[in-house]
Amino acid sequence: MVKGATSVWVDKKVAFIGGDARQLEVIEKVAALGAEVIGYGFNGLKRSISGFSLVDEQCSAWEQLDVMVLPVTGVESGGQVLTKFQPGPIVLPDSFWARIPRGCLVFTGISKPYLKQLAENCQWRVISLMDLDEVAILNSIPSAEGAIQMAMENTPITIHGSNCAVLGFGRCGTTLARTLHGMGARVFAGARKAADLARIREMGLSEFPFSDLSLVLPKMDIVFNTVPTVLLTRQQLEQLSIHTVIIDIASSPGGVDYFSAEELGIKALLAPSLPGIVAPRTAGQILADTIVRLVEDLPDAED
Amino acid sequence: MVKGATSVWVDKKVAFIGGDARQLEVIEKVAALGAEVIGYGFNGLKRSISGFSLVDEQCSAWEQLDVMVLPVTGVESGGQVLTKFQPGPIVLPDSFWARIPRGCLVFTGISKPYLKQLAENCQWRVISLMDLDEVAILNSIPSAEGAIQMAMENTPITIHGSNCAVLGFGRCGTTLARTLHGMGARVFAGARKAADLARIREMGLSEFPFSDLSLVLPKMDIVFNTVPTVLLTRQQLEQLSIHTVIIDIASSPGGVDYFSAEELGIKALLAPSLPGIVAPRTAGQILADTIVRLVEDLPDAED
Amino acid sequence: MVKGATSVWVDKKVAFIGGDARQLEVIEKVAALGAEVIGYGFNGLKRSISGFSLVDEQCSAWEQLDVMVLPVTGVESGGQVLTKFQPGPIVLPDSFWARIPRGCLVFTGISKPYLKQLAENCQWRVISLMDLDEVAILNSIPSAEGAIQMAMENTPITIHGSNCAVLGFGRCGTTLARTLHGMGARVFAGARKAADLARIREMGLSEFPFSDLSLVLPKMDIVFNTVPTVLLTRQQLEQLSIHTVIIDIASSPGGVDYFSAEELGIKALLAPSLPGIVAPRTAGQILADTIVRLVEDLPDAED
Amino acid sequence: MVKGATSVWVDKKVAFIGGDARQLEVIEKVAALGAEVIGYGFNGLKRSISGFSLVDEQCSAWEQLDVMVLPVTGVESGGQVLTKFQPGPIVLPDSFWARIPRGCLVFTGISKPYLKQLAENCQWRVISLMDLDEVAILNSIPSAEGAIQMAMENTPITIHGSNCAVLGFGRCGTTLARTLHGMGARVFAGARKAADLARIREMGLSEFPFSDLSLVLPKMDIVFNTVPTVLLTRQQLEQLSIHTVIIDIASSPGGVDYFSAEELGIKALLAPSLPGIVAPRTAGQILADTIVRLVEDLPDAED
């Protein structure tokens, strides 16, 4: 559907520092669209990508960049950049960063304070991809599949026919609930807001307000939590069957009283950030699609 | 799931003025929960409902009301209330309304200026049900089914296997798209926001930005519009096959250039407000559930 | 996916007698594939179809036919053929039929005795399309949608959220149950065989053996019957709520004790053969696709 | 739904030899229904089950059995029975088996020749559960989930949005295709029979005849095979992208030319019998439900 995409990317100068497998999808995509693509920190990369060349810190190309794509974690304090393609982190001095032109469009997953400061000093335009609603929704797909895979690996029952609670009906909860329903689970989705409860019902799932949590828990086989506050307190955990498994995909430290869960003998697993682990290529394509779209939609992209 | 609901409703004095079939569901529900229920404007009602008695304007019960439920259209100027249960509208003078106690909880579908003024004068607490996100989402279900029924009645093809466009991905568009997908249609859902496009993709549908509308239209069998601006201009209508049928559920005057559609020989139907027509009992239950929940959740409901 | 289809159809001589709107889809398709197509009994047809010409009984083309397509009802006794395109039935004498070459491939919906005798006398190869599993399965789609449309038009509730029983899990029952589930109904599918009950459970529906019918009926809003024996006897009908609506799509005389249903005040509707009525174009395309495939797959089709 | 189930099971004498985790579900169920349950070969079982007692070979109860439940693999030659609950297989002499009464109902997964001979000699009624359509359909659920789990673990992409081929539309293929569709995959299901292709289309999936296999393969991300003949020959494998992963759940030796797949660098995995591995409790419940139903439905069960 992207018409004339090339016009925007041809001759754009794009650099990648890093990183992890997700960046490779972005590199392939923007190189295919006609950009001039350089990379730093990919010395261990086994395969070559057409249109992508590795450079060193001194390369003059850094001074002409239109776009720079950092790893998901961005730049840590001291100018550290985490990479999986060579041993140890990359450390780049301020004198290096200062050579990136002002106005450069810098993509990162998240913006830590050091990067924010750099961007302010250098007058870059930074886009934190993980803060975008669009990326969060698309990332909810690999997150949901990763959570389901964890549940499969940690229960002696099928998802089909099981009673699954999904706590929270935001971007991840919605996707998780739909996927479980599509696999034949009996889904009980809990939320706080009346509008969310209405949508859950419309989706053909069983809705419950969090105030009814203790009524729902006793019959659950699997509980998926997406809410980053401790809904699963000791009191709630005591409602669970000993066979229930909890998969917690709320960001660390999660939404479970893990100490009590262990004491009660209930298996509760705090999932790491799943997209990059369970489906790095899909996660990379999500970033690639979003970066391409954002650059094309920029008011000054055609300049 | 409603625990102790009775405690709230027992001895509550509730009046209904009006109205249409939807109110009957509410009457049955609150009467069953133990309220004292009176009605005015139901003289033509054929059946009796246990716990519900018809009164006249002079009845002293009006002065002790806790809750008053108006028809969906509320009160028109001059104190008119539309009813389907007796010939002609009801007209009630200000002297009548003034007897309803201050603080009374008044449910209406929509709040027209006359009702707003009354409420201010009388110090009622008015809740416009149709403005609630919860009600709008639940009403999207009968709306979607009504729209699909209209499409079935006006096409020589099945929904299954047809190419259906859904324009707009708000509360109605989401429900309509999901239902069509569940019936086996190929659904192309159009939206403006990147986050909506991401959610459409997650739902397994084909997403397109409105800027691609003219590319999508030529292959559509049915176009459902939910957006209350004229997206389907003459220029867009010219992209359609002569066999395409348009079902427009945006609020009047709809989102279609109807004059051009007729000139081009394209069948375009502006749906009326569907829930009360195609599924009055379901539409009534939605109102009943919401009213019951709101009264139970009120801070002072237990007083 | 049809490769080289033209080679088979080019120069094939194909005649249509009849008929109804479904045949028009077949005419359009085989004409587009390059066949020489003649028609008889279409005098009232308003539009012209490229490559299709109307002939009379004397036309010599009848003696060179490769394929003849009759209406769904075939040939009635006395050589009658039912048509909707001109007033009164067509009556063709044996002397006419005798001119159709032996070996001609004759498509009909159903084979009544008179046609069977003709085919034996004239040595035609007759294919009764409605007897083919493939056609029956594809026709189950418009049947299911027609049944759902009837339910929508005859109930004050939405399909979504309603309790629907589907009796029988053959070709129609399976499609109907899946579509209702896709629309958000709570589907209770009844069958006799353990394997069918297992498949129902796998599909995420609630299964019940017919022996439990009387336990299931009381809570149903809508009952769809597909079984051509009277499962819904007076005793079973007495289990139903007065609000329950029965849609019976079993072939006439259906599977309901209609006399008792009326006495008990229960709305029970015997659906006519739905595909040609609710979705004539889809029903015609099903026949067109099947006829095209069968001719192409014939061992001697390439001769 | 099981009414009066107890009447059939109370006082029934039931023995279990073996076995694996699936039997535990059956033991729990029939013990709960009131049967007298003995077991042999469960010495390593860690937990106790109410109503279940371990006996030795000499126990007189063997001579009064109504029902005997063997492990899925039944009895191997020489009277061997495989067990996971103690080290090494059990070996039971003919003199032992001869004490089981004639007419005893013997459940096994599969009937190997030695068991068949024993049954004939001893005049037992043997039911091979894995041969029952009902069990095969229900087992297709854990099989499908196991296959999907394998695909998740062996691809860097999500199931959602991926192109998945499912070869064969029998009991497993149907379940697998539906589950993948429910997860948001684009499913291309291949079959030979026109009726199966019609059903695939009705389910909202893309159908293709096996003759078009080579056209479909190039764009697939994952290929699931359920057909126990080598459809994926070297010639077909050459159509695949290097990134395609094949999951083969046809019974050993599977439906892939594994030698060629390795030479071509294509990852092809032959799945073991999945239900007992990925979901032993669900697999056990399937057996338990079926055994209970069969005993209850037996003509002489009430004697």
Image (cartoon, coloured by chain):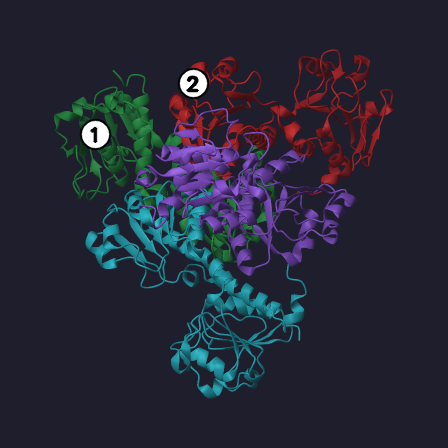
Chain colours: A red, B green, C cyan, D purple
Mark 2 in CB contact with mark 1 (< 8 angstroms): no
Which chain is indicated by disc 1? B
Disc 2 is placed on an element classified as: helix
Residue at the spot 79% in from the left edge and 15% down from the top edge: A92
Location of residue C217 with respect to A225 vertically, above or below? below
Under mark 1, the amino acid is Ala
Viewer-closest of B294 and B125: B294
Q: Nearer the viewer, mark 2 or mark 1?
A: 2
| Left or right of D106, for residue C243 | left
Image spot of residue A302 (x, y percent): 72, 34
Disc 2 marks which residue?
A236
Look at label 2 and name its amino acid: Gln
Tell which of D68 and B58 is nearer to you: D68
Q: Which quadrant would residue B282 be assigned to in this image?
A: top left
- Left or right, B193 with respect to D57, comes to right
Q: Residues within 10 Å of mark 1 (few under 14, many from 20)?
A: many
- Where residue B15 is drawn, which disc sits there? 1
Please report the residue visible at 30 percent of the width from the left and 50 percent of the height from the top. C245
Spatial separation of the CA atoms under disc 2 and disc 1:
41 Å
Measured from the top left, where is residue C63 in percent x and y? 56, 85
Name the subunit of mark 2.
A
Circle 2 crowding by C-alpha within 10 Å: few under 14, some 14–19, many from 20: some
- Viewer-nearest residue: C120 or C245: C120
Question: Residue D265: x, y in percent?
Answer: 77, 42
State the count of labels.
2
